[in-house]
Amino acid sequence: MRTSKILLSVLAIVIAALWAFPVYWMVSSSFIPTAILQSFIPTFFPNKPTGSNYVGAVADGSFWSALGMSIAVTLTVVVFCIIFAFLAAVAISRFRFRGRRSFVIAVLIVQMLPAEGLFIAQYKMVSSVHLLDSVIGVSVIYIAAVVPFTIWMLRGFVAGVPADLEEAAMVDGLSRFGAFMRITFPLLAPGLVASGVYAFLQAWNEFTVALVLLPSEAAQTLPLWLRGFVQASATRETDWGQVMAASTLVAVPVIIFFLIVQGRLTSGLVSGAVKG
Amino acid sequence: MKRKIGIVAAATAALVVLAGCSTPAAPEAESADGQNITLWLMGGDTPDALRDYLKTEYADATGGTLTIEQQDWADALSKLTTALPDAENTPDVTEIGNTWSPTFTTVGAFSDISDMYDELGGSKLLQSFVDVGAVDGANYALPYYFGSRYIFFRKDIWAAAGLEVPTTLAEFNDDAAKLKTATQSGFYIGGEDWRNGISWIFANGGELAAKDGDIWKSTLSDPKTIEGLTQLQKLYTDSSLAPVTEADSTPWVNINNNAATGAPEAATIIAPGWAHWSIGDLTPDPKDATKTVATWNDATFGNFVLPGVDGGAAPVFAGGSNIAISAASKNQAGARELMKIIFSEEYQNMLGANGLGPANTDYTASLGDDQFATALAESAKNSKLTPAAPGWAAVEGSGLLEEFFGKVNGGGDIKALAKEYDAKIDELING
Amino acid sequence: MSSLGNARRGIRAPHLLLIPAIVIMLLGMGYPMIWQVVTSLQKYGLQQQFGKPAPFVGLDNYVTLATDPQLWLVVGKSLAFCLITAALTLAIGTLLALLMSAVTKTARLILQVALLLAWAMPVVSAMTVWIWLFDRRRGAINYLLDMIPGVNMNRFDWLSTPLTFLLVACIIVVWMSVPFVSFSVYAGLTQVSDEVMEAAQLDGANGWQRFWGVILPMIRPVIAIVLLLQLIWDLRVFTQIKLLQDAGSKSGDYDLLGTYIYKLGTSSQDFGMASAVSILVLGITVALSWFYIRSLLKEDEA
């Protein structure tokens, strides 16, 4: 028993190393001068780390505008997505009403729509109200795409909080709203965090819709900036050092955010799914 | 034939101008003063100095602002498709790949600028580019710059193998095969690189498509095209180590010495003329020690024009761009003002000085008279465009040509493939 | 008095609560969806994009689609890719989850952090790194494989045949998706109570029997939703394929449904057909997940 546990632990660590290797490779290479990376023999460790790749990657300022755009879009999506999904989740898990079943089916179907076929229509709609290159235009599409899954996730959480608790609190003299805020809301926190993170990831990483709805360079988000950076670099011999530095810059905020909420996220994500 | 269309176009344009003079309510009613306009440029070919020049001149001429937005070639087609019809978001003036001109022109994406045609250079403009941008004698898209492709080679490697600059295409094919080793391409060409590969079709008198009455038909099965493809297939197999999936890419990185091995990946490449800035001995960049710069070295590197079947210059693919005013633009007057600046003598000379073939043939001298300018002029003389069919952009966009050339160079049965892809291309080529 | 108030609110509140979500879904998805259905019944190409009226052609696009062997090839490839990738993801993810519950706390934490790193990587960043790792000349993977005696992988071009291209895509997608599966299943496992496990052990069940007989039935709901999501995501996989095509070949042999539709729309400018294919994909997705949706709805009714 003991030895098997140790062996398995070693195995787990080996697998961990394999899994994290691409991430390590990205960060490590971003500190290696390009002249060394051009060699046919890979360099696995930055012996003489340099920051010049980072300097080069952010040199033309478009990185900062893309970062600003990404933050604005992501915040908008996360905030509205949580509010909308939360309200809807309360409705479908706490109330029986006409149209409930249709709504649930709609939520499920919307998740399955192939986005690649919708973008011309989305472009037409967004441009007809003059919202191309704007935070609002792209956010509306993102929220619509993310809200169904978050409703689905939150629904499990809301149903998991016994209604009796609320009622007990109301007997103690709290209003329905007060009871909800004091009793139910804190119990839902992990679920809200989980759906917030989900929305964050979707908005931060999204590429296809952004490509179409944010045509001008000044309005691009980080994934567009990164792809543009890779393409610009490819007209020369690809400058892998700078490209890796650029990738790291796009990935770091997500990774940090992720590690912070990690514990809540996992418990959150799953208890929702388990209920499902 | 092409020349004839040009003349007809010029004549029609002249008529339109005359007609315009006699009509009081010419489109000049609108004023360019203070109009803020947007210009889309594709990729990074236009240097910053030229962009700044355009902005300054435009501001001087109209008092308005010119915004230049650069689009990636890879996404350009989809962005043009969505933005051009849309008055709110269209660029006022846009550069387009010359081969896409027929597609956008026939659907009415661009403004008729026949009345300006003579003012902007008229018959002096590169006629093959003018033709793809004209419909029924009216001019919509005009040439922006051209750049045709020629051969760069390693003098040292060719000399070591006892080879001279070839004078016929067959000689070139043989020499390239002799230079291939396990780690070195005799001639580096990607399997899907149809833009360079079609030179072998053109050289053998073949075409990609021909117009039969009003209908365009793909002509890959034409015996002359097949002959060219057969040569290309043999050339790829015998001399190139490039991946069969590689399309038009950055072959010049392969002719420089590789930092790791001290030897080049290829003895010979074909590339647009401006690639010579990237070819040469690599030394650390004085501005940034982590990078390298290439300095052309005449002892090691050389260039020549791809020879034709019977000597002379082979007809190669005429690269380059057209430029046009979006029909949906609300700033037609400002856009026309910008066109005048682009076709001015000064700007045309600036294009030439930067190695981009100027649209107006009067200013070709600005390219200089060094070996690169000579090769550019010589290869451009015989260069050919892809078919001016309404659906050509769709054909290019569908990736069918990459697919077809990749399969041919992968060792496929040329006749069967040609038949298959003729059918596929026929579905798209008429728009 | 108060109960009456509640009852009245009970009738109206749920609908009010749904309004924001419904409005945003109608805006962002509903309108485009309707446009897509209508367009799939039209001849809608570049000319229509530039203002020509789009003629209705009935089911013509669907007929063309049904008789196009090329399309069915893409559908077949996509289905195979989706099933294999989803199955691999689920198997590896579940194994890693079981591993997590069998190792020391430190080892578990290390494994979890590694998986989180992979999960958190933005797709475009991750693709950039992977494409370099698989680069034929400078890629670390060819270099490492080449060191194995008797294996010659120097300059092996992974992206040059459709099969190896899709293998690379599959590896990358599995790498990205396994963390989600592992964490979900692991959390499911933690809800299997110790008593149940102990009871099973007392019964003398070995590891394998315990897994099939006790653990699997208890985590079935998690497995079901995770599998469904993987199937949906893998069927529509787009960004990964598109970026791999940037690095390799644009040719149709390397298309799955996502890129096939994208090309129909943007490059061939045939929006009518692109819409029709999108509807087909939607149909396939609904068919794949129909049983699951039905069971969910039933459970929901209960």
Image (cartoon, coloured by chain):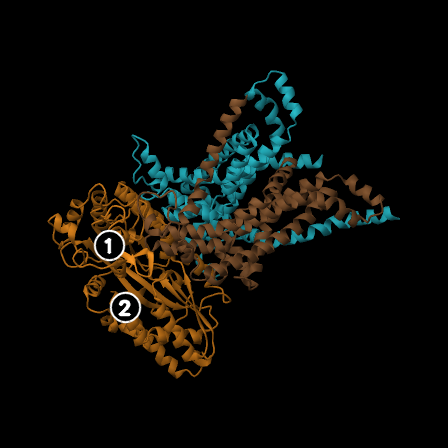
Checking the image for residue B126, the label placed there is 2
Mark 1: few, some, or many residues within 10 Å (few <14, many ≥20)?
Answer: many
Q: Nearer the viewer, residue B24 or B141?
A: B141
Which chain is assigned brown? A
Q: Residue at x 79, y 39 (%)?
A: A164
Q: Amino acid at mark 2?
A: Leu
Q: Quadrant of the C terminus of chain C?
A: top right
Q: Is residue C43 visible?
A: no
**Image colour assigned to chain C:** cyan
- The image shows residue B429, relative to residue A163, as above or below, that is below
Q: Which one is nearer the viewer's eye here, C286 or B351?
A: B351
Question: Quick one: B223 or C117, which is closer to the camera?
Answer: C117
Question: Disc 1 designates what residue?
Answer: B270
Q: Seen in the image, is A245 located left or right of residue B381?
A: right
Q: Sequence order check: which comes first, mark 2 or mark 1?
A: 2
Which element is circle 1 on?
strand
* Neighbours of disc 2 within 10 Å: few (<14), some (14-19), many (20+): many
Which callout, 2 or 1, points to the residue nearer the camera? 1
Chain for mark 2? Answer: B
In the image, farthest residue toward the top: C204
**Viewed as shown, does residue B305 lie left or right of C136?**
left
Amino acid type for the residue under numbered disc 1: Ile
Q: Residue furthest right?
A: C1
SS assignment at label 2: loop
- Indicate the chain coloured orange by its letter: B
